[in-house]
Amino acid sequence: MKKNAIKELREKDTEALTQELEEKKKQLFALRSQAVTQKLEDPRQVTKIRHEIARLYTLLGQRTLAGTSNGEVKAEKSVKKEAAPKKVKAPKAEAAPKAEKTEKTEKKPTTRAKKPATKASK
């Protein structure tokens, strides 16, 4: 989609965007149905329609956050953010000496039940 098309979408009111969204959803449904039943001429159409639907949802979401019903919302991507200052790492403190092991625990002998002898050992 060209930048001019995006500008045109921003100029439309919310009601027109909602109608266009519903149309795109119907187109997507038709394309998916067509893809199942027969081969599509251009399989990329499905992706293009999905991207257009996402753009419409984005515009409607921006307007909801801004509280406007017409295309008064400016693109927030055009505003460049200043780079945040880099954080300087503090020097690492010296590691504390590890505690010495005092006593080893005694291992208890394990007792296992003896298996009965089998007849196959004759």
Image (cartoon, helix red, strand yellow):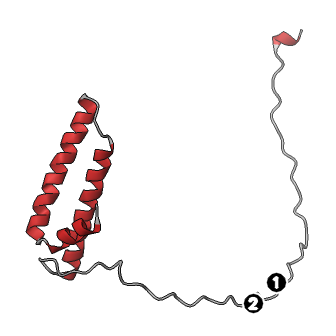
Instruction: Residue at 32% x, 40% y: name it.
Output: 43
Measure how far apart labels 1 and 2 are at the Cα level: 12 Å
Q: Position of residue 39 (x, y in %)?
A: 29, 31
Amino acid beneath label 1: Ala
The foreground one among 91 and 61 is 61
Circle 1: element type? loop
**Residue 91: assigned label:** 2
Report the side of 25 relative to 48 (left or right): left
Amino acid beneath label 2: Pro
Instruction: Residue at 13% x, 55% y: name it.
Output: 22
The foreground one among 57 and 92 is 57
Report the side of 53 relative to 108 (left or right): left
Report the side of 27 relative to 114 (left or right): left
Q: Nearer the viewer, mark 1 or mark 2?
A: 2
Residue 53 in the image: above or below residue 26: below
Image quadrant containing the N terminus: bottom left
Total numbered circles:
2
Residue 48 in the image: above or below residue 63: above
Mark 1 neighbour density, 10 Å: few (under 14) some (14–19) many (20 or more): few
Q: Position of residue 26 (x, y in %)?
A: 15, 47
Instruction: Residue at 25% x, 40% y: name it.
Output: 32
Q: Position of residue 11 (x, y in %)?
A: 15, 74
Mark 2 neighbour density, 10 Å: few (under 14) some (14–19) many (20 or more): few
The foreground one among 22 and 3 is 3
Report the side of 119 relative to 36 (left or right): right
Q: Which residue is mark 1?
A: 95
Image quadrant containing the C terminus: top right
Instruction: Residue at 86% x, 78% y: name it.
Output: 99
Circle 2: element type? loop
Q: Position of residue 38 (x, y in %)?
A: 25, 29
